[in-house]
Image (spheres, helix red, strand yellow):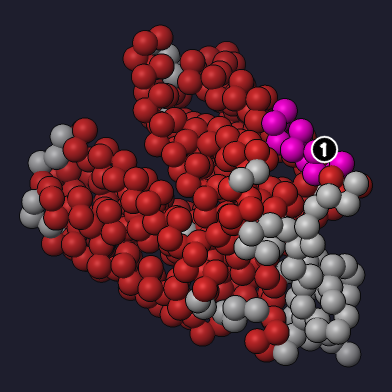
Amino acid sequence: MNKKIHYAWYVMAAAFMMNLCVIGVASVGISIFLPALREKLNLTGTQSSFIMSLQGIATIAALGGAGNLYKKYSVRSVNLFFVFICIIGFVLMGVADSIPVLYLGAILTGITLGGAGHVPTSTLINRWFVKSRGKAFGIVTVGSGVSSTILTPTITWIIQKYSLMYGFMFASAIILVLEGIAFFIVRNNPEDMGLKPYGFEESGMSADTGKKVVTGYTQKEALRMPSFWMLSFVAFLVGFTVKPAIGHIILYARSAGYEPMVAASAFSMYAFVNIFTKPLYGAIADRFGTYKSNWYIFIVYGVGLASAAFITIGTPFLYLFALLFAIGIPIGTMGNPFWTTDLFGNREYGAIYSYILAFYNVGIILGSTFFGLMTDLTGTYLTGYMVCASMMLVGLVVIQSLYLSRKRQVAECKVPL
C-alpha cells in the first residue's frame, strides 16, 4: 500500500513557485529588461544601474513591515498583496516614458522583494517541516535558478520580437498564474488542515495538540540581544559578498583575457550547477546539523572566492572557480533562515528574519559599490574577490561562536521555551 504524500510537500511546491516568481522574475529577471529600457529612454549607465539601487533600498524599507504583517495575518494573503504591487510596478516600467515613472516602478518591485521574497517561503517551510527542513528549503530556492534558465531566453525573445511592454506583460502573466496556483495550495499551518508538521513523530512536538512546540524569543527580546546583532553582522558580510561576486564573474573573466563565449559558458556552468548545490547544502544541514554544515559552506564558498586568483593560469581554472563558487553560493539564500531558526527559535521567526534579511540587503548594496571601487583603485576585479574571501573567514568565526554560545545556554537551561 502506497503511503500518502504529506501535504507539506505540496506547500513546498507552492513555495517553489513563489520563489521562482519573486526572486527569479522580479529580482534576478529585472536585468533582462535593462538593455531595452536603456535604449527606449536613452539612459546612461548610472541611470540604469540606479534601478537596482532603488530596488534594494525599497526592499530594505519593506522588510520590517513585512515581518509584522506575516506575524499578524495569513501568509498567502499578505504574499499575494505584495505580488500585485509587483504587477503594478511592471506595468509602470513597461509604459514609462520618463525616468521618474520608471523609477517608481522599480521602487514598487523592490517593495515586493521585501514583502514577498524569502520571508513567506522560509516561514512556510519552518511551519510545515521538522524533518527534511534543509532539503525542502533547498528545493524551494532552486526556483530562482529555474526561472533564470527557462524564462530569461523566453522574455528576451519576446522583447526582441515584439516589444518591451509585451515582455513585461508576459512576465506579469507568469507571476499571476504561478502565484495564483500557489495561493490555492498554501495553508498557513498544518493544523489548519488537521495535520501535523512533516516529521512530527520524530521530535519537537506536543503530543496533545500535534503542534510544533513554540520556542525561542520574541522580536523585541531578540533586538536586545548581542547575538542578534552579531548574526546581523554575519548576514551583512554574506550579502556584501554574494551578489557583487556573482555579478562580476563574466567581467572578471573577460578582463583576464578570455573570449566572450568562454566567459559566458563558465557563468552558465555556474548557474546550472547551482541548481543542484542548493538541495545538497540543505541535505547536509539535515544530516549533520547546521553547526557542522557551517564549516562546509563557509570554507567551500571562501575557497571558491579565493580560487579567482588562479583563473589566469588557464581555462580549466576558470571552470574550477565557477564550480567551487556554485557549490558555496547557497550560503546567500539558505544560511540566514537556518541561523535565525537555530539561534532565535520559531516563536516570532518571520519578524526576526525580516530584520536579518534587511542587513543582508544592506550588504548587497554596499558590497556592489565597494567591489567597483576596489576595481577602480587597484585595476583588477581580483581585489574584490580576495576581500570577500577574507570576509567569509570572519563570518565563519562569528557564526560558530554564536552556535557554541547557544549550546552552552541550552546546557545551562538559560534559553526560553
Q: Is residue 43 above or below residue 204?
A: above
Question: Of helix, strand and loop, which one carries label 1?
Answer: helix
Q: Is residue 234 left or right of residue 196?
A: left
Q: Is residue 360 left or right of residue 51?
A: right
- Main SS category, magenta section: helix
- Identity of the residue drawn at 39% across and 56% down: 62
Q: Position of residue 365 (x, y in %)?
A: 40, 36
Q: Is residue 326 visible?
A: no
In this figure, what is the number of numbered marks?
Answer: 1
Q: Residue furthest top?
A: 378
- Identity of the residue drawn at 45% across and 62% down: 66
Residue tagged 1: 404
Q: Position of residue 402 (x, y in %)?
A: 74, 38
CA neighbours of label 1 inside 10 A, class few (<14), some (14 to 19), many (20+): few
- Identity of the residue drawn at 20% across and 50% down: 103
- Is 287 magenta? The answer is no
Q: Position of residue 101 (x, y in %)?
A: 14, 55
- Is 404 magenta? The answer is yes
Residue 305 in which image quadrant: top right
Residue 112 in which image quadrant: bottom left
Q: Position of residue 231 (x, y in %)?
A: 63, 40
Q: Is residue 383 visible?
A: yes
**As rendered, which of 155 and 375 lies closer to the eye?**
375
Looking at the rendered image, the quarter that the N terminus falls into is bottom right
**As rendered, which of 280 and 389 lies closer to the eye?**
389
Report the amino acid beneath label 1.
Leu
- Identity of the residue drawn at 26% across and 53% down: 106
- Which residue range is magenta in the image? 396-408
